Amino acid sequence: MYYGDPMLAKIRTFLFEQRGRAQSTDGGHSREELHLAAAALMVEAARLDGDFDAAERAKISDILRHRFALDDESASTLIDAAIGAVDAIPEIYGFTRTLRQNFDHGERVAMLELLWEVAYADGELHDYEASLLRQVTGLLYVTDQESGAARKRALERLRD
């Protein structure tokens, strides 16, 4: 699948070059797999409360469009593909493994921050969403302290 512009490069630019680092993809995963893994985790975080509402979809689309410089159509296509992937593969281990193998520690913390932002997009954090994010924190090898700091940054951004 192709999701428009080379999204992986844009993700890396947004998330990681701001730290003065650019990474090359040599983990054996295609751009599409990395795109899908990141979007699928966002979709899973949004859907866990049993209600994937318009606010959550809009937040994911906003992240994909503004932070990763995608157009509306590419963001929508990627979200739809992520929904299909989550429906077909109802476990998160494959998605987190793909990200863990291709993103360094700082990149994984930044991804977790985006997941917190999506989880709070509807104005509340459901127990299932909190549980997923604790699980993802461990699977991405991020500490609880780093996750807490990422959560605070995400909440501050949502308040702005």
Image (cartoon, rainbow, N blue to C red):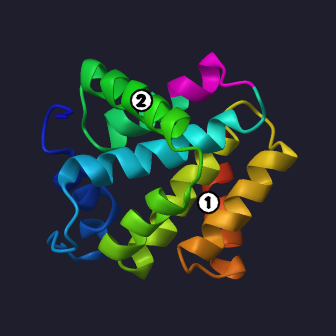
Between disc 2 and disc 1, the foreground one is 2
Q: Mark 2, residues whose alpha carbon is within 10 Å: few (<14), some, or many (≥20)?
A: many
State the image coordinates of residue 112 (x, y, percent, origin top left): 55, 61
At 41% from the left and 51% from the top, the residue drawn is 38
Residue 128 falls within the magenta-colored stretch: no
**Apparent side of residue 41 relative to residue 10 in the rendered image (left or right):** right
- The residue shown at (22%, 77%) is 21
Left or right of 125 on screen, residue 144: left
What residue did someone put label 1 on? 153
- Residue 92, quarter of picture: bottom right
Which contiguous range is marked in magenta? Answer: 51-58
Name the foreground residue: 10 vs 88. 88
Q: Secondary structure at mark 1?
A: helix
The quadrant holding residue 67 is: top left
Would you say the residues marked 2 and 1 are in contact, meaning their CB atoms lie under 8 Å apart? no
* Residue 107, horizontal then vertical, whole percent: 39, 70
Q: Which mark is residue 110?
A: none
- Element at label 2: helix
Residue 34 image point, x, y percent: 30, 54
Q: Nearer the viewer, residue 102 or 85?
A: 85
* Residue 95 point in image, percent of width and height: 45, 57
**Dot 2 corresponds to which residue?**
79
Give the class, few, some or many, for how many residues have Cα within 10 Å of label 1's Cα (few <14, many ≥20): some
- Upstream in sequence: badge 2 or badge 1: 2
